[in-house]
Image: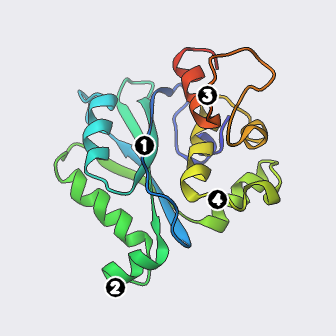
Amino acid sequence: MGFLFELLDFPEGSRMTDLWNNSWTDEAVGDEIATGHFIHLGDDQHVDVEADFLSSHLPFHVAGLGGVFPDGKPWMFIMQKAPADIAILLRGQEDPHAMLREALDRALEFNPDAIVAEELSWYVHDLVSVYEDEGAPRSLVENWSVADLLRGLLAQCCGADLSDIVAGYPDCAFPHTSHACEDDVFNDIFAGWVAGLQ
């Protein structure tokens, strides 16, 4: 079970049905911060539709996943990142995560049935520590961008082992297996999950 699945409050029997990756995320600039928001959607809403709409209103969106609870109610987890110094400078607030939180709040004004159930906030060293706690050597991930650290946690939710993700970074998740390689460790895993191979 992945780090995010252990951290978030999922009732037993919840299922992951969707994932998405914003491949054109801006390159890392200086120290970056990240947030993840666990959102409960309205009863009759569809994860893919709401994720597409919501992410189009979030300029710092990186990736996310979604699914359904045992009762069929949909949920999503959306991840954002931004340079910490820009966030403080633009918003004039001590907590740089506030900018990402406010961006999400503005986007959710268009969906009153969506409720933010949990918020996770990270600095880059927090994410590196997650990898280290999961058994990946710090020296191999400490120079990754925040976006790639987030994508790695998403890939782990697809059934991949974090140490295998790190070992294959950046080019290939399955170097010893015949597969249609995406030439990107994360896209390899995402494509495998979509195809039901994970």
* Kind of residue indicated by mark 2: Gly
Against 128, residue 187 (above or below) is above
Q: Earlier in the sequence, mark 1 or mark 3?
A: 1
**Local SS, label 1:** loop
Q: Earlier in the sequence, mark 3 or mark 2?
A: 2
Residue shown at the point (51%, 20%) measured from the top left = 194
Q: Are marks 2 and 1 in contact (CB under 8 Å)?
A: no
Label 3 – label 2 distance at C-alpha: 40 Å
How packed mark 3 is, by other alpha carbons closer than 10 Å (few <14, some 14-19, many 20 or more), is many
* Kind of residue indicated by mark 1: Asn
Q: Which residue is mark 1?
A: 22
Which of discs 3 and 4 lies nearer the camera? The answer is 3
Which of discs 3 and 2 lies nearer the camera? The answer is 3
Q: Is residue 99 left or right of residue 164?
A: left
| Residue 84 point in image, percent of width and height | 48, 74
Tag of residue 188:
3
Label 3 – label 4 distance at C-alpha: 22 Å
Q: Quadrant of the C terminus?
A: top right
Q: Is residue 26 left or right of residue 129?
A: left
* Kind of residue indicated by mark 4: Leu
Q: Which residue is mark 4?
A: 127
Label 2 – label 1 distance at C-alpha: 27 Å
Q: Earlier in the sequence, mark 2 or mark 1?
A: 1
Residue shown at the point (29%, 27%) measured from the top left = 46
Tag of residue 68:
none
Q: Quadrant of the N terminus?
A: top right
Label 4 – label 1 distance at C-alpha: 19 Å
* Kind of residue indicated by mark 3: Asp
